Amino acid sequence: MLFSPLLKRLKRGPQVILPKDFGMIVALTGITKKSLAVDAGAGSGWLAVLLGNICKKVVSYEWREDFVELAKANVKRAELKNVKIKHADIFKGIEEKEVDLITLDLADSDKVVVHAAGALKSGGFVVGYLPHAEQVQRFAKACNAAGFRNVFTIECIVREYLVREQGFRPENTGLTHTAYLTFAQKE
Amino acid sequence: MLFSPLLKRLKRGPQVILPKDFGMIVALTGITKKSLAVDAGAGSGWLAVLLGNICKKVVSYEWREDFVELAKANVKRAELKNVKIKHADIFKGIEEKEVDLITLDLADSDKVVVHAAGALKSGGFVVGYLPHAEQVQRFAKACNAAGFRNVFTIECIVREYLVREQGFRPENTGLTHTAYLTFAQKE
Amino acid sequence: MLFSPLLKRLKRGPQVILPKDFGMIVALTGITKKSLAVDAGAGSGWLAVLLGNICKKVVSYEWREDFVELAKANVKRAELKNVKIKHADIFKGIEEKEVDLITLDLADSDKVVVHAAGALKSGGFVVGYLPHAEQVQRFAKACNAAGFRNVFTIECIVREYLVREQGFRPENTGLTHTAYLTFAQKE
Amino acid sequence: MLFSPLLKRLKRGPQVILPKDFGMIVALTGITKKSLAVDAGAGSGWLAVLLGNICKKVVSYEWREDFVELAKANVKRAELKNVKIKHADIFKGIEEKEVDLITLDLADSDKVVVHAAGALKSGGFVVGYLPHAEQVQRFAKACNAAGFRNVFTIECIVREYLVREQGFRPENTGLTHTAYLTFAQKE
């Protein structure tokens, strides 16, 4: 698996967002070192750590206590002071305001879109990490209903290559899907 | 074309590195807001601007005077103080030391690898943006010869989707290749 | 566009099934020169012609009179005696029995699955050519309900390459989607 | 692995050409039940069997005696009378004339191209099954040198999908490369 050096000392718990999808989020939302990001659910905290190395501040919501502990431990291992793991239910609302980026990796991410619309600053992005096509449909519909503009969906496929004396070719087997990513920008 | 909001006000000159490939570089090298990045050739300065929004400092080499002017104008439009466009020939050497990331988008990027080896800090990455398989072979060979470890090559393919009432499907046509990316990490 | 020499003299009317998807159908259903194939809707008759060059006999249903004429003209141009364009409504039933392959390219292909189940011989395949994910869901559901086994869905992506003195690389732009293909084999 | 019912009873020896690549060959060369095909090396004889179910006649060259025996056994299991496994060295020449299709899956397939040029009928195709980019370069060069026209290279990628109650998505892992296919048509 392709890996980020930033994740080297981290423990892996529930399924994690891989570097390739994190890379797409960075590339297409234009977050910078001045950005405030909100993330849910924290899970192992990998995405929160990756975002924390780039953004000014990251707040990551997580409902399950065991994941809160795991994510906090990973943030500590990553030596980040600007990442807060918050034991709270994001389905009840987002407290932060003027947020630049909200990333959602939940079974029902579409139900958080209305809260995201209230928390984001103008020009900010909500991004859904959505394994199934049906989740994409619901998420995109929720974004349109909440008044987002510039709603688009992509999938990032990374092919690994063998580069050797005997020749250049793609690896024979590999990762073929993690999730679709739906982006929506606030007016 | 998928776009970064960071590039909105920039002018486009020579061929540019697209956000998807920038995203892979961020994701797999683990650069942060503490990083020093060196880039060549600057071209339109897009990659320098994208890196400048994340890294502490970016120095971008460019030999052609007209591109130096274009890149400088784009850095100004992006309102970045931490990006320096340097009118110099990177094939003659890299002056910066303890660099975290060196990105090379040149016809003969492999010839700069030996300079990259000297300029990078331990754990730092050189990344080649290489449209052709033959360039990948030469670049990877140069990295191995220069003592880099963890040399790997990928290709990032982004599929765009239509998500509508009538259904979910990929776009019928689109971008199918920009370049292979070869990464090499310094011991 | 990648093309089959068999289609060289044919006229193009409504959207056609491309050679790559025809190739997948041949490859995964195992039709031979002994096979009887049923196809609907005929459209331009391209798939019927492609199948007719391989199978013993092909019957292609088409409801629209103008398409019947177009498809018949194309069969004539292809000099095939074993392909019959049938002006009939396949939603009302399939008259042929002991069929080896039934290919469906209709807006509501799932509604023909029950007829396919009756017409196919044991081990025969019905294949849906389905542009959208939602059509795949309905088609696969209909196949399971009709008692088919071995129901699977694929997508065939063909990348074209430039192979030149200056190097080997994929084309920069190209076809990225035609349709998903769902296969189901009769018990 | 996606499979053809035609291969069900066959034994597997050396690496085989998969149905997806066979499908591309059928689709893009336009072979029919009237075609004469030559194949080398036979290996397990899978491609010879697949072609034999479609073409009028297939002759498959194989140098290694053990593979000749394996391929012959597989042809027998497939109950095909029109497929001949020939114990001969194709690098020394192709005896058949007016051939419609020649498929080459050898380490040095480019060295057989000149023989293919002599054996093919006008409009016929030679196809190289080439795992590495360097092999493609050599093969395409040999085709151009031998006076072939319409030389093109593709790669066929098949994605498999999960279609379930919980949703529609690609499989998480899978086959990502078998070989590049280079096609060349005789004037």
Image (tube, coloured by chain):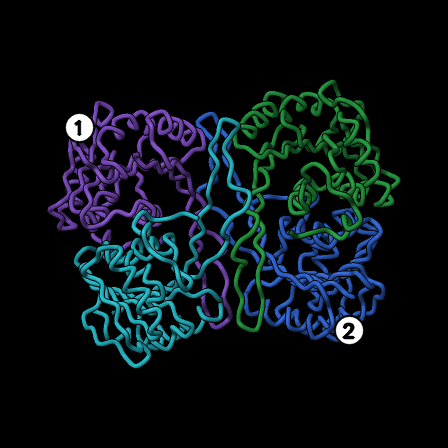
Chain colours: A green, B blue, C purple, D cyan
**Label 1 CA crowd tier, 10 Å (few <14, some 14–19, many 20+):** some
Q: Which mark is residue A103?
A: none
Which residue bears the numbered disc 2?
Answer: B93
Q: In the displayed structure, would residue B118 be above or below residue A59?
A: below
Percent across and percent down for residue B139 are 64, 69
Question: In the rendered structure, which amino acid carries the disc numbered 1?
Answer: Ala
**Closest to the observer, A149 or A35:** A35
Determine contact: label 2, label 1, CB under 8 Å.
Answer: no
Of badges 2 and 1, the one in the foreground is: 1
Residue drawn at the location 18% of the way across and 45% of the way down: C74
The x, y position of residue B118, in whole percent, is: 80, 71
- Return the chain for callout 2: B
Question: In this picture, is D180 found above or below D119?
Answer: above
Crowding at mark 2 (Cα within 10 Å: few <14, some 14-19, many 20+):
some
Q: Secondary structure under badge 1?
A: loop
Q: Chain of mark 1?
A: C
Q: Which residue is mark 1?
A: C88
Q: What distance separates the C-alpha of mark 2 from that of mark 1? A: 75 Å
